[in-house]
Amino acid sequence: MPSGRLASCVAGRSVSGRTAMNERTFPVVHSVLDASAIRGVVEEEYSLGDGPQCELVLAGMNDTYRLATNRMRCIVRVYSARWRSRTEVLYELQLLIHLAEHGMPVSVPIPTRDGELMLTVRAPEGDRHVVVFTHVPGHAPEWTNLEHCRRAGQLLARLHSAAEDFHGPHLRAPLDVAYLIERPVAAIKPFLSGRSDDWAYLVGFSERLSARLAAVSDRLDWGVCHGDFSSTGNFRVGHDGGLTVFDFDLCGPGWRVSDLAPMQRAAVGHKDRRIWRAFLSGYLDERHLSSTDLAAVPLFYAACRLWSVGMRASHVARWGALYMGDWYLDWQLRVIRQWEAAHGCYE
């Protein structure tokens, strides 16, 4: 390269058009907000104590920060842009307040000095909602500990009962067949574009599963669901052995058996049926479960698995296409086929 051309490139003045490239602002799918900026917003808007220290704990579906002052510790959640509307977040927060008022061990939102439950900040990718929650001490449960499983079942049953009379002013879309099956399958479709046989099977399976759910749906218990009850990261075990549950980001009205089914999936994953039996026993200690609901657990096991694949598919722009590689699709389709063969479905 001639020395003059090299000099102009280094200076950012290349006649090849790189100057325009350097000045272009690229769109952002997801940013991670600086912890010191979060600390400044919280310090300005909340009365939580002096000398706050803030650190990023987890960059996930939403980003989670831990904040500590001279008075207390708390958790700051920054919701992803375009993931939850203001109304949807307020539904979650009002539900948490309702559950706490009914004696449920949950993490609750802390209001600002002005009494607001949430703030909205501008990020490069758009508006993001910010909520400060009470901190829950303790450690995560282990589903290989059957007492933890039993207590989780009891907690879910009490949660379902406490939410019976929840009628908040804000709405969330239902956790129905469209949520569990139809939208996930649509999100998966591009990743099976070169696998026509697998795509045909998945479409047929989703139709058969939807038909089986439709046949019993009007006889299933319907109400507020947690939406992600089997994740050990959403609980803390206190010094007395009691469980506290948090992260209601996926909550909404739905068939309550959909909250139980993921625990059956956890039992399958650990290859230990005692996990499911202990959890179910705990649930039945506190709340009635009809024979129709119990019989529908395997259907929702399959639906929740399909939903989880759809979640990965719909977030590849942020999480990366590696999570939807052939190895993953092969595994999930193999499990779904095995489930269908074991539960009397047919192609």
Image (tube, rainbow, N blue to C red):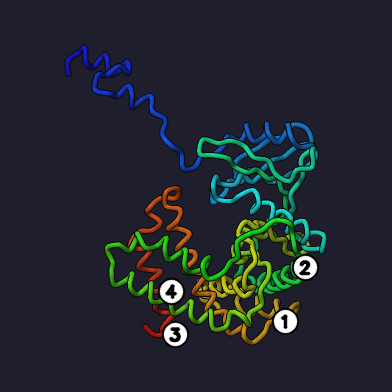
Mark 2 or mark 1, earlier in chain: 2
Which residue was labeled with disc 1? Answer: 288
Q: Is residue 2 above or below residue 271?
A: above
Q: CA distance from mark 3 to mark 4?
A: 16 Å
As helix, strand or loop, the secondary structure at mark 4 comes to helix
Look at discs 1 and 3 and give the one toward the viewer: 1
Q: CA distance from mark 3 to mark 2?
A: 38 Å
Residue 246 in which image quadrant: bottom right
Residue nearest the observer in this picture, 21 or 100: 21
Q: Position of residue 19 (x, y in %)?
A: 32, 21
Camera-side residue of 86 and 80: 86
The residue tagged 2 is 165
Q: Compared with residue 130, is residue 170 higher up or lower down, i.e. above or below? A: below
* Residue at the image position 68 percent from the left and 70 percent from the top: 223
The CA distance from mark 2 to mark 4 is 33 Å
- Is disc 4 surrounded by few (<14), some (14 to 19) or many (20+) residues within 10 Å? many
Decide: marks 3, 4 in contact (CB < 8 A)?
no
Dividing the picture into quarters, in which one does residue 286 lie?
bottom right
Q: Earlier in the sequence, mark 1 or mark 3?
A: 1
* Residue occupied by mark 3: 342
